[in-house]
Amino acid sequence: MAKQLKENIDHRRRRFLVATTTVIGGAFLGTAAVPFIESMEPSAAARAAGAPVDVDISKIEPGSLITVKWRSRPLWILNRTSEQLQELPKLEPRLKDPHSKQPQQIPSCRNGYRSLKPQYFVCVAICTHLGCVPTYRPAIAPPDLGPHWEGGFFCPCHGSRYDLAGRVFEGSPAPLNLPVPPYFYVNETTLRVGELENGSDQNWHPETW
């Protein structure tokens, strides 16, 4: 009888130890899983890299350009002068895609200015050839660009040329116009780049950039 009682006590003790070990182990695994699961979430920096950005355009002088960062890429905002705007239609016969038929811009910017308002031009400053950053060359007919240069963007890596609407010239290695990202006017002096006014197009991608 004493032997049977001892076996029952040992059996109950064994079940208690197994249950306790299981609970402690489960708690440990749950605690250990938290950092792992959290590590799968995008970091604040990663979220910020793709988030829309607001840009104050009130201090951009006519003919001047500023560079801001969006999606870890340089983004240009150019305040075009009336003279620069008047030249754009004249350049169409010399361009690869003068009417922006390729999907390098949001539909609302598929026009002669490639912009929501003629004055301000917004684009990603990445050459569509091999990803170099072009330079802003507003001067007319500089010696290194020749007598037919009316101002635009020039890529020093392989010589691709774009007009002041980011449209690529015939004869350039670059196949496509510079990308125009989604953006809208928050107010008269602020642009939000990276989404449309209805909050859509945050995952926009051009054909190439």
Image: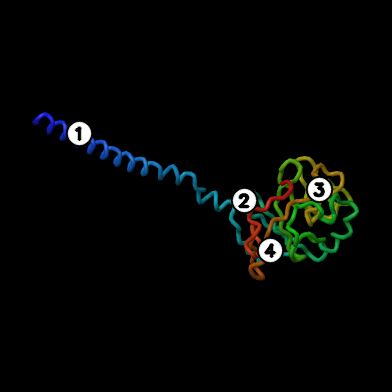
Label 2 residue SS: loop
* Alpha carbon separation for disc pair 1 and 2: 63 Å
For marks 2 and 4, the one nearer the N-term is 4
Q: Determine which of the numbered discs, if any, sits on residue 161 in the image.
A: 3
Question: Mark 2 highlights which residue?
Answer: 71
Tell me the kind of residue under disc 3. Answer: Arg
Of tags 4 and 3, the one toward the viewer is 3
Q: Residue furthest right?
A: 93
Q: Residue furthest bottom?
A: 188
Q: Determine which of the numbered discs, if any, sits on residue 145 in the image.
A: none
Question: How far from the left and from the top, in percent, is residue 46?
Answer: 54, 49
Residue in the image at 64% along x and 53% along y: 203
Residue in the image at 81% along x and 61% along y: 111
Question: Mark 4 highlights which residue?
Answer: 60
Tell me the kind of residue under disc 4. Answer: Ile
Name the quadrant containing residue 1.
top left
Out of 75 and 47, give the one closest to the viewer.
Answer: 47
* Alpha carbon separation for disc pair 2 and 4: 22 Å
For marks 1 and 2, the one nearer the N-term is 1
Question: Mark 1 highlights which residue?
Answer: 11
Out of 18 and 9, give the one closest to the viewer.
Answer: 9
Name the quadrant containing residue 114.
bottom right
Of tags 1 and 3, the one toward the viewer is 1
Would you say 183 lies left or right of 148 here? left
Scheme of image coloration: rainbow
